[in-house]
Amino acid sequence: MLYSTHFDVHVQQDPSEDNAGRVARIRLWLQTSSRLDPQRYSRVRDLADALLDGFLDSGGLDDINEILASYFRRFGQSEDLRDVEEAIALQNRSIELTPDGHLNPHKPTHLEDLGNTFMNRFELLGNADDIDQCILSHSHAIALTGENGAYKPGQLHNLGNALITHNSSTLERSTF
């Protein structure tokens, strides 16, 4: 089997290259390499690390969705729960950095994403704390969304699903 080796992506950043260049180089490698390349997993990790470096350096939220997507892609390849843990930590950080208020649509969205991540982890591990955190995240998102918010129906739907899942899991645990 042949793998793309037309250029290499080094884990260590070239001192003359800024982080944006590093991200661009790794993205290019991922776009042009085979999905079967044995180095792909480590390159996805490199991309997540480079995006995280940029996020931490800027203190902003510009790259948060791409960082999270990198962790989830990597989790899909490795099934390493540390990737889900990293995603939760980043989501919590993005929530801390985003101001409250009905005029800010980002915080409820970040809370919804965090709730969905807790739901995913609950479905993987069955830990009751995860479904509780999921419910809290969705409830907080609803509280921060105005009564006529465009995303309110979806938020209520997600909270309803979390409550049903919680009820079902509680019944299952009580029958044992």
Image: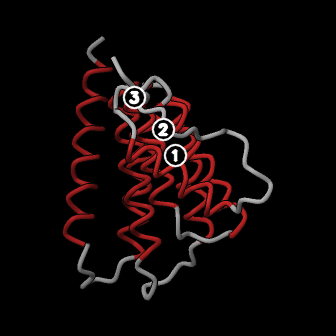
Q: Is residue 146 above or below residue 57?
A: below
Q: Dot 1: few (<14), some (14–19), or many (≥20) neighbours within 10 Å? A: many
Residue 77 tag number: 3
- Give the number of the mark in front: 3 or 2: 2
Q: Is residue 49 above or below residue 83?
A: below
Q: Amino acid at mark 2?
A: His
- Give the number of the mark in front: 1 or 2: 2
Real-space CA distance between mark 3 and mark 2, rounded to the nearest whole angstrom: 23 Å
- Give the number of the mark in front: 1 or 3: 3
Secondary structure beneath dot 2 equals loop
Residue at point 68% right, 55% down? 53
In primary-sequence order, the first of circles 1 and 3 is 3
Residue 47 tag number: none
Q: Amino acid at mark 1?
A: Ala
- Which quadrant of the view contains residue 130? top left
Q: Is residue 126 above or below residue 66?
A: above
Q: Position of residue 149 (x, y in %)?
A: 27, 81
Residue carrying label 1: 87
Residue 6 tag number: 2
Hey, which residue is sitting farthest front in the picture?
Answer: 6
**In the image, is 70 to the left or to the right of 82?**
left
